[in-house]
Each structure stands twice: as C-alpha cells, then as structure tokens.
Amino acid sequence: MSRALTDELRALVGDAGLGDLADRRFERDATESQGLSGRPDAVVLPASTEEVRAVVAWCCAHDVPVVPRGGGSGFAGGAVPVHGGVVVALDRMTRVRSFDPLLWRIHVEAGLRTSELRRIVRESGLLFPPDPGAAEQSQIGGNIATNAGGPHAFKYGVTGRWVTGLEAVVPPGEVVDVGGPLRKDVAGYDLKSLLIGSEGTLGIVTAAWLRLIPAPEAAAPVVATYPDSRAGCAAIERVLGSGIQPAALEYLDAGALLAAGGAAPFEAPAGAFAVIAEADGSVAETAAVAAALHEALGEGALALHAPTSAAEVAALWRWRDGVAIAVTAQRGGKMSEDVVVPLDRLGDAIEAVLEIGARHGLEACSWGHAGDGNLHATFLVDARDPAELERASAAAAELFATAAEMGGSISGEHGLGLVKSGHLGKQWNDATLRLHRAVKQAIDPQNLMNPGKKA
C-alpha cells in the first residue's frame, strides 16, 4: 500500500481496521481451481456498518474496486481480488444485535460464523437450519451472498429462505434496509432476494434478520449402498414417489465412495453407489419416517446402515463432510464444480461426469445433494501440472453446457464467482442476460463492487 492510501483508510477504520497485506489468505479463497489468486492493494476489517459505508464511499469516489470477503470458504473465486482494489473483510462484525428466542428470530452482523450462530440458538432449543460446509469458517454474510445450501437444504431450503431482512451497503456508499423482523413483506420489488446470492457484486451485506425454528427432537440417518448409479438413482426417486420427506438425501458415486470409504463408519463395498438419507422431527415422527426410508431404500440395496446413537450420527456426518478432502488426496488436487439438473436427469448427469472426464483424459467422480439434483462433479488433477489444469477447465466448461442442456443450472450453491464467469449464456438467452446486466448497471454503474464476478 502507498503511504497515502494507508493514511486515508486508517482515518476511516483506525489502526485495528487495517489488514496485513502479508497475510496471504486475503489473496485467495477455498476455490479448488489451483493457482487462482489475486493481489489486493489494501485490506480493511471494518468494525461497524458505518465503517463499511465509509470505505465503500471512499472507493467509489476514487474509482477503486471493492472485494467483499466473508470466511473465505467459497469455491468459485468470489473473494479473490483479481483486479486489486480494497478487500473488505467482515471478520470483526460478529455482534448479535438482538435475539428473541420466544419469537424464533435473531438479528446478527454478517461476520458471525455459521457454527457460532447455530450454537447460540441451539442453547435456546432452536435451530438455524442451513448447514453449508466449513461451518467453523464460513460467515453468515458470505452464506447470504452466495445463497449457500448444504445437505439439509432438501427439507429446509437454502440460506435465503431463512432471511427476513437485510442491512447492506451499496454504491456509492449508502446503507439500505430491506425487510426486518417480519414474516411477510410484499411491499415494493423484492430487493432482499436480489441482494441474496448477488456475491458482493451489488453491495455488502452487513447484518441480517434470520428466522429460526424449534430444533428437532431426534435425527435418524440411513445409508444404503447399491451395485451402480442407476439402482441408486431409482432408490432416490422411490423415496420421493413414496411421499417421504427426509431432511437430507445425499449420494456418492463409486469413485467418491472408493476415495472416502476407508474412513466410512459403515461397510463401503468397492464399486458401490451410496445414498444417505436422514429423518428428523419429533421422536415419533422420526421413527415413522426412518421406517419408511428403510423400506424405500432397502429395495435392491446391497446393504443398509442405520446409526442410532447421537455419537454415531455425528460420526456419519463428519465423515460426509470430509469426502472432498478424501477425494482431493487421491491425486493432490481436484477441480470440483457444482451443477444442478432436474431430478429425473440425475442418473444421466452422474454418468455424463465420468464421460466428460474420460474425453479430457481425467479421472472423475461426483457426490452431492441427490434430492436437489445437485452434483459436485469433480475432475482429479495434479495441481502442479498446467496441462491437466487446462484440461480440467475445458472439462468444467463442457459440464456447464451439459447441465444447461439437461434443463439444469451451472450453479446450485457455490455461485458463479470468477470460475463460472462468462458461462451464464449457456443457461440463459440473450434477453435474460441483458436483464441480468441491467440490474448490475443500475446499482453499480462504476462496476466497482467485486468486478469480474457473477457475470
């Protein structure tokens, strides 16, 4: 940073609000496309909405890009400062502004971590249902910015479903409030939903009103393994066709299960396809749904596993959370992209991932949120090999086109960020793209808010 820039930002956020440029975490996020990084001109860690407003106003006045940053756990390069500028990290904005457990609502600042929010509300017998990965790292503001999902989004929906109000800073440095501690609000355009999922390209979410529910009394997962993906996908459709409402409905294809199976808390036969479902609710409701899942998933299954104790259930989900790490360990790197297809095309999409990988000379596998048709399609690479990374990028582009051709989406929960920038035309026609760009132009005419992302 130049001395002048340092001095001007220090005047806005104080010494404690200036980040260290030597801290390399501000150059990247958790994106698995190896080598994706940028170099910020400055890093600020504001402690209040007023400080965020002042920084955004300064950047707009000086034509400096603004890169909002939550926990840095994103997989699309959304927090990477590829055009330099000022990284605005919300780590210090962690206050709970109000908590009304009897009214099932909480008002929090954007830097509060997902795990801490869930702990706070759980102490009052409540639940904030969204459970995106990296809960110890991800922040509520980042979850809102990407409209993050997770395994239990099948029953409970993505993050945006639980947001009733937002405070945000938008160009050229103004604070806007939409919604609030409300259960209904249809006044005006749905600006709240426009900001949710905007990936910091329209403004910076600084606080949110969130809706809560009573925590389920019980949870009962069921794991079923099948000889191949077609049998597994048939079981998934059978669950839905039976009218069962599981809380989660996940899958791992043979490659993913092979990579992670050694640590699985159940028998994982080589070459098998796995389905994980979970019942939750009252004790009686959980037992009834679990019994129905056993029946629906048991047909054609190689084996069923049904943990019963809280420790066993927790162990299963810890293992599921570690699948990505286990897959990465196979070759030291991977390019993993989330796409979504209609549920009746899930089997086709799972097979297509393997076919695309083979065409590009890459080992491939997938796992993900089966009930939502959401695949984490993965191409294994040696991160040190530029040729493999290039082939993986080409495979990812083909994957996006394939998902769109199946009537799906190029992103279900990771956003577009930088990684998928330029691919939206595979999914939308020209008129829709123009409308998308008009929104950006109207709110951020200088194109300073996270430029190059969500495009």
Image (cartoon, grey):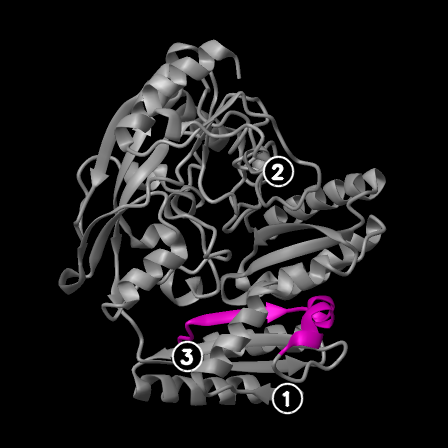
Q: Is residue 287 above or below residue 430?
A: below
Query: Distance of mark 2 from mark 3, alpha carbons?
Result: 35 Å
Residue 387 location, quadrant: top right
Query: Distance of mark 1 from mark 3, alpha carbons?
Result: 18 Å
Q: Is residue 63 above or below residue 44?
A: above
- For disc 2, the neighbor class at 10 Å (few under 14, some 14 to 19, many from 20) is many
Q: Nearer the viewer, residue 146 or 327?
A: 327
Q: Is residue 365 above or below residue 238?
A: above
Identify the secondary structure beneath mark 1: strand
Q: Residue at x 51, y 30 (%)?
A: 20
Q: Is residue 237 visible?
A: no
Q: Nearer the viewer, residue 136 or 254?
A: 136
Which amino acid is tagged 3? Ala
Residue 183 percent location from the top left of the image: 18, 53
Which residue is disc 1 drawn over? 303
Q: Is residue 61 above or below residue 206?
A: above
Q: Are marks 1 and 3 in contact (CB under 8 Å)?
A: no
Asked whether 272 falls inside the magenta stretch, the response is no
Q: Is residue 16 visible?
A: yes
Which amino acid is tagged 1? Ala
Residue 189 location, quadrant: top left
Residue 31 percent location from the top left of the image: 61, 44
Identify the secondary structure beneath mark 2: loop
Q: Residue at x 72, y 80 (%)?
A: 227
Identify the secondary structure beneath mark 3: strand
Which residue is disc 3 drawn over? 279
- For disc 3, the neighbor class at 10 Å (few under 14, some 14 to 19, many from 20) is many
Residue 274 location, quadrant: bottom right
What residue span does the magenta drawing correspond to? 244-264
Which residue is disc 2 drawn over? 419
Query: Distance of mark 1 from mark 2, alpha carbons?
Result: 39 Å
